[in-house]
């Protein structure tokens, strides 16, 4: 009778083995879940970065690259005119040096402060590039009809995403 009970039950080693197997399975499930949550977070942060980049692109698309009144080929300093703040920027070159950290949160295409995205930062650089090689940055007073606009997105001050595009100057005037 004792032998029958022994055969129908589990030995201590079998029970321990079972417990270990269940433990390993749970650990694997938790690890998979953590990995998938991280992947989701990364994907979500990148979509936010794209969204914030698009805000700058949309905001600057309809603006002239530089003030049509000034002679582009001799302009020496890119950036806002004296006294101009981001809400007044009326040319693309005004955005050179723009950093949304100075406002507290990124801005939208219609110039609203997006407080819900305050962990993110938009940085904009506008540079003149060579007429024949858009990869080559040239001095501000160089004779060139093109600028490169670069938008960099940071998350908690860490670089996350960067995009640039070329705008032509001469056809705007
Ligand atoms: Ca301006
Ligand atoms: Ca300007």
Image (cartoon, rainbow, N blue to C red):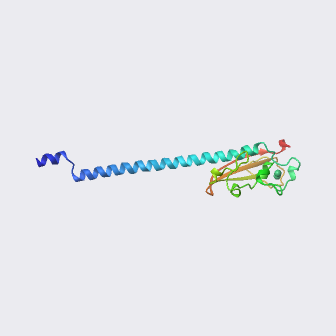
Quick check: 171 above or below 85?
A: above
Give x and y (percent) for residue 160: 62, 52
- Is 74 displayed left or right of 164 in the figure? right
Give x and y (percent) for residue 159: 63, 55
Give x and y (percent) for residue 152: 67, 52
Q: Closest to the observer: 76 or 1?
A: 1
Viewer can see residue 130: no
The residue depicted at 44 percent of the width and 48 percent of the height is: 32
Q: Closest to the observer: 63 or 160?
A: 63
Viewer can see residue 7: yes
The residue depicted at 80 percent of the width and 48 percent of the height is: 91
The residue depicted at 65 percent of the width and 45 percent of the height is: 51
Give x and y (percent) for residue 120: 64, 53
What is the quadrant of the C terminus in the image? top right
The residue depicted at 33 percent of the width and 49 percent of the height is: 22
- Is 69 displayed left or right of 86 in the figure? right
């Amino acid at each position: 009778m004792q032998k029958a009970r022994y055969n129908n039950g589990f030995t201590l080693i079998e029970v321990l083995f079972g417990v270990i197997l269940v433990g390993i399975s749970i650990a694997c499930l938790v690890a998979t879940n953590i990995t998938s949550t991280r992947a989701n977070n990364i994907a979500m942060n990148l979509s936010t970065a794209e969204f914030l980049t698009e805000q700058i692109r949309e905001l600057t698309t309809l603006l002239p690259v530089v003030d049509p009144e000034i002679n582009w080929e001799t302009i020496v300093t890119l950036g806002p005119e004296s006294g101009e703040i981001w809400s007044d920027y009326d040319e693309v070159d005004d955005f050179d040096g723009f950093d949304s950290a100075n406002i507290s949160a990124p801005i939208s295409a219609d110039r609203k402060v997006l407080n819900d995205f305050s962990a993110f930062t938009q940085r904009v650089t506008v540079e003149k590039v060579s007429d024949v090689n858009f990869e080559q940055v040239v001095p501000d007073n160089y004779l060139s009809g093109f600028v490169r606009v670069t938008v960099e997105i940071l998350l908690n001050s860490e670089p996350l995403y960067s995009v640039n595009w070329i705008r032509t100057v001469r056809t705007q005037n």
